[in-house]
Image (tube, rainbow, N blue to C red):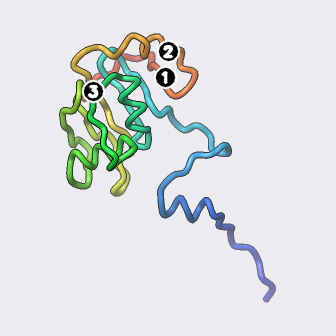
Amino acid sequence: EYGGTAGLVTLEDLLEEIVGEIRDEYDTAEQEDLVIINDHEARVDAGFPLEELNERLHLGIEESGDYDSVGGYVHSVLGKIAEEGDSFQSGRAKWIVEKVKGRRIETIRLVAEERWPTEVHGHDGAGEIRVEEQTGHLP
């Protein structure tokens, strides 16, 4: 008989349904964008800027104006909707699609032919790069 509130929908909720997760000052850090696993392996969030990844890890990738993010680059190279386990060689690393949710790539694992640059290893973990304590290898 009298109206009640069943729930609230914010503009951010609507936008996130259309374009995917949006990070802002109110979101807690769920995971790091770039994680150095060991001397030759790293995990990167698909939304991480490709140009920044290329600079930090010295990947030697030819960049294009067609994509800005790591996920966009992977989709472009694969030429199809990515599936977990899809892989290709590009620059100085093998790229492996690690986690996919729906049609969206969430994380990519990079396996380098040579060690990551020394400035990456010396990073203290404050910021977007975090060095894991364990030495994980691909399954």
Q: Is residue 125 left or right of residue 112?
A: right
Using the image, determine if residue 75 lies above or below residue 44. below
Q: Residues within 10 Å of mark 1 (few under 14, many from 20)?
A: many
Instruction: Using residue 105 as the reference point, say whether residue 48 is left or right of it.
Output: right
Q: Quadrant of the C terminus?
A: top left
Q: Quadrant of residue 49?
A: top left
> Separation of disc 3 and disc 1 at Cα?
22 Å
Foreground label between 3 and 2: 3
Nearer to us in this view, 108 or 3: 108
Q: Residue 60 carries which label?
A: 3
- The relative height of residue 13 versus residue 134 in the rendered view (above or below) is below
Q: Which mark is residue 130?
A: 1
Residue 131: give x, y in percent of width and height: 45, 19
Q: Mark 2 points at which residue?
A: 123
| Front-most of residues 111 and 102 | 111
Q: Which amino acid does label 2 sit on?
A: His
Q: Which residue is drawn at 35% across and 57% down?
A: 102
